[in-house]
């Protein structure tokens, strides 16, 4: 399955590489993603925190060790640094959405314009070491929050701005696919997902 939001040279868009909030990627909750190999519907509640932690460790390694971390592999395709900054923000936003799901009754998430966030956050100009530190901190916060979810709270519901309904469990599965898929975007290898036992 091709990503219909993939950046292209034709439209001259140098900024777009993320998964827009208004695109429907909810099918990843139903079946394995052929690209990154993740099958998040099989990841149970007791595994989600660990999987987010392991994915964050992979991102930290990429940000700290990839010699081409600031290089865009092609025009319009984000560098590993830009993807890493995006993933850091995904972790942080997911903590906020999880808070909301756990405290409000059936909340509607505000739309998050990820390309605008990339431009405003100047992802390409950030320091990879600092992004790695911030990503790790954001992941630790999310993982601790996941560990504290009460058994009866996993089915609490909310709605994305595009109308897709979510529970605590499916929101976390959905976002887990996102951070794993972006590992595939950067490494081009399903091994990244397989090593997480998601393949
Ligand atoms: Zn995928």
Image (tube, rainbow, N blue to C red):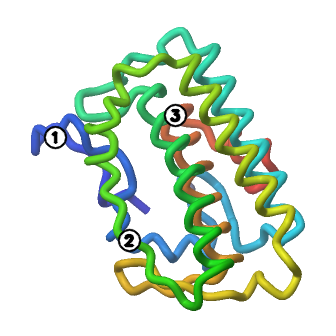
Q: Is residue 156 above or below residue 11?
A: below
Label 1 CB-ligand 1 distance < 8 A = no
Question: In terms of depth relative to the viewer, which is nearer, 194 or 68?
Answer: 68
Q: Residues within 10 Å of mark 2 (few under 14, many from 20)?
A: few
Question: On the rendering, which quadrant does ligand 1 occupy?
Answer: bottom right
Q: Is residue 99 above or below residue 182?
A: below
Which disc number belongs to residue 110?
A: 2
- The quadrant of the rendering that contains the C terminus is bottom right
Residue 87 vs residue 160: left or right? right
Distance (Cα) linking label 3 and label 2: 22 Å
The residue that label 3 is drawn on is: 84
Distance (Cα) linking label 2 and label 1: 24 Å
Q: Residues within 10 Å of mark 3 (few under 14, many from 20)?
A: many
Residue 189, image x and y in percent?
60, 37
Residue 108 vs residue 54: left or right? left
Mark positioned earlier in the residue sequence (1 or 3)? 1
Label 2 CB-ligand 1 distance < 8 A = no
Question: In terms of depth relative to the viewer, which is nearer, 36 or 58?
Answer: 58
- The quadrant of the rendering that contains the N terminus is bottom left
The residue that label 1 is drawn on is: 13
Residue at disc 1, secondary structure: loop
């Amino acid at each position: 399955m091709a990503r219909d939001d993939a950046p292209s040279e034709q439209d001259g868009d140098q900024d777009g590489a993320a998964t827009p909030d208004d695109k429907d990627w909810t099918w990843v909750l139903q079946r394995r993603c052929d690209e990154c190999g993740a099958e998040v519907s099989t990841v149970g509640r007791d595994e989600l925190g660990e999987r987010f932690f392991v994915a964050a460790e992979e991102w930290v390694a990429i940000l700290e060790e990839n010699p081409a971390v600031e290089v865009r592999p092609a025009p319009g395709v984000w560098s590993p640094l830009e993807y890493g900054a995006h993933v850091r923000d995904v972790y942080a936003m997911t903590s906020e959405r999880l808070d909301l799901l756990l405290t409000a009754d059936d909340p509607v998430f505000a739309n998050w314009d990820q390309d605008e966030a990339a431009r405003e956050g100047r992802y390409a100009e950030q320091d990879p070491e600092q992004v790695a530190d911030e990503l790790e901190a954001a992941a630790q916060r999310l993982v601790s929050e996941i560990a504290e979810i009460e058994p009866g709270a996993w089915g609490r519901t909310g709605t994305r701005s595009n109308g897709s309904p979510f529970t605590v469990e499916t929101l976390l599965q959905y976002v887990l696919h996102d951070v794993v898929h972006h590992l595939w975007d950067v490494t081009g290898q399903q091994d990244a997902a397989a090593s997480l036992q998601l393949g």
